[in-house]
Image (cartoon, grey):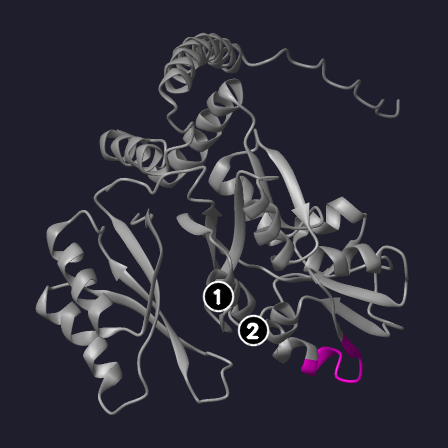
């Protein structure tokens, strides 16, 4: 008699040990939800007290201190780098109960600027996408947004010149910073490289992907547009176009990710400044790890730049960035953008700034803000 096929084995039920662990997780989730709601109740009370005192809802130095304190006592296995994004979301939800926070950034949806804004403020914000850096500054200056988020420096291409120039002509000042690891991807409506007539992206992204484009698409036009997400939007409307943008932009506009991480520098990072109007938000108080940003100019005479550095050395203040930009006066004059370690309320920093002001023909503090040292 021929062997008969064996009937399929009866499906074993869920592992009892796994079920028990899932029940423990469910119970802990219920505890977490109850604790979060208790925290929100306290946040509402804090918001009412702030409102009666006229205090600002958002205090970047306070949030930095909270996150630093939690990192310091974190026993694990939760990784310390996971603490910040979790608590930023919790604090974002708390602020949203007090008052909606409107944040302007270079749009449309899917830009790295949007990602930076959400990373800094959390997702419980009112998003205000803008068509250009100029519009971000205008919108925030006019009060249509409480804060603006703009890129100021890239690890590959250097400073974002337009952002720096706008600090000279607007009253906005910096109250925070954040940085992103920027991974550029080639996106397209079709899932192949054939027939691409142009690659659309922000000029900075095109420059950051020069090597890959030269090797893989040497004859294809590189078309600068206002943002990477705008390039993705255009690529979604024309099969001949490709875009350089984030994976979020691919999802947003329904595009295929043809080639991931095509940036020339694998460690490509962009630094973003968080700006606001001084009439609507006070400067952050010292947090223990702060940066003070300045823009200055000096008279065109021998030794003038050297004289800028003397007060910093005399008072023991570390300079972490020094960039020059033409003053566009036709006289070969320059503005110098300087980052200093420390807060003006610290005696040695305050003394250095007073001495530096005397040595400068033009002197403007762009902001003092906490930085992430972890």
Q: Residue at x 21, y 61 (%)?
A: 353
Measured as percent of width and height from the top left, residue 351 is found at 13, 59
Q: Residues within 10 Å of mark 2 (few under 14, many from 20)?
A: some
Task: Tell me: 40 left or right of 211.
Answer: left
Residue matched to label 1? 164
Q: Residue at x 62, y 58 (%)?
A: 134
Residue nearest the viewer, comparing 131 with 23: 131
Task: Tell me: 105 left or right of 256.
Answer: left
Measured as percent of width and height from the top left, residue 192 is found at 83, 65
Quadrant in the picture for the N terminus: top right
Q: Residue 360 shows which numbered tag?
A: none
Q: Residue at x 56, y 73 (%)?
A: 264
Q: Residue at x 23, y 34 (%)?
A: 72
Residue matched to label 2? 264
Q: Is residue 251 above or below residue 262?
A: above
Task: Tell me: 166 left or right of 130.
Answer: left
Measured as percent of width and height from the top left, residue 371 is found at 33, 49
Q: Is residue 17 magenta?
A: no
Give the CA separation, mark 2 to mark 1. Answer: 24 Å
Q: Residues within 10 Å of mark 1 (few under 14, many from 20)?
A: some
Residue nearest the viewer, comparing 198 with 174: 174
Q: How many badges with numbers are in the image?
A: 2
**Secondary structure state at the residue bearing disc 1:** helix
Query: Is residue 269 among what the camera can see?
Result: no
Query: Is residue 162 among what the camera can see?
Result: yes
Q: Which residues are magenta?
A: 214-222
**Secondary structure state at the residue bearing disc 2:** loop
Residue nearest the viewer, comparing 71 with 347: 347
* Residue, far left: 314
């Amino acid at each position: 008699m021929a062997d008969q096929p064996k009937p399929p084995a009866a499906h074993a039920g869920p592992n009892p040990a796994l079920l028990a662990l899932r029940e423990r997780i469910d119970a802990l989730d219920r505890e977490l939800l109850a604790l979060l709601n208790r925290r929100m109740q306290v946040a509402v009370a804090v918001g009412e007290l702030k409102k009666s005192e006229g205090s600002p809802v958002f205090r970047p130095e306070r949030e930095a201190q909270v996150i630093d304190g939690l990192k310091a006592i974190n026993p694990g296995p939760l990784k310390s780098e996971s603490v910040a994004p979790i608590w930023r979301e919790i604090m974002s939800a708390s602020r949203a109960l007090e008052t909606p926070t409107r944040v302007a950034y270079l749009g449309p949806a899917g830009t790295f600027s949007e990602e930076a804004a959400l990373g800094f403020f959390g997702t419980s914000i009112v998003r205000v996408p803008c068509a250009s850096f100029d519009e971000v500054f205008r919108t925030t200056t006019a009060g249509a947004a409480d804060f603006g988020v703009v890129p100021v420096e890239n690890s590959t291409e250097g400073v974002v010149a337009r952002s720096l120039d706008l600090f000279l002509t607007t009253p906005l000042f910096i109250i925070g910073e954040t940085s992103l690891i920027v991974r550029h991807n080639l996106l397209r409506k079709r899932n192949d490289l054939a027939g691409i007539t142009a690659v659309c992206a922000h000029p900075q992204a095109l420059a950051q992907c020069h090597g890959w484009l030269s090797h893989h698409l040497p004859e294809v036009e590189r078309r600068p547009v206002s943002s990477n997400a705008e390039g993705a939007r255009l690529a979604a409307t024309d099969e001949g176009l490709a875009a350089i943008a984030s994976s979020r932009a691919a999802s947003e506009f329904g595009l295929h990710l043809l080639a991931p991480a095509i940036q020339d520098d694998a460690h490509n990072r962009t630094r973003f400044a968080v700006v606001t109007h001084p009439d609507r938000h006070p400067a952050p108080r010292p947090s223990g790890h702060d940066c003070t940003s300045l823009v200055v100019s000096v008279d065109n005479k021998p030794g003038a730049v050297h004289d800028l550095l003397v007060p910093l050395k005399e008072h023991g203040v570390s300079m972490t960035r020094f960039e020059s930009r033409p003053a566009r006066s036709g006289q070969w004059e320059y503005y110098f953008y300087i980052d200093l370690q420390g807060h003006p309320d610290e005696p040695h920093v305050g003394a250095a700034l007073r001495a530096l002001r005397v040595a400068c023909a033009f002197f403007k503090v762009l902001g003092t803000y906490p930085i992430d040292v972890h």
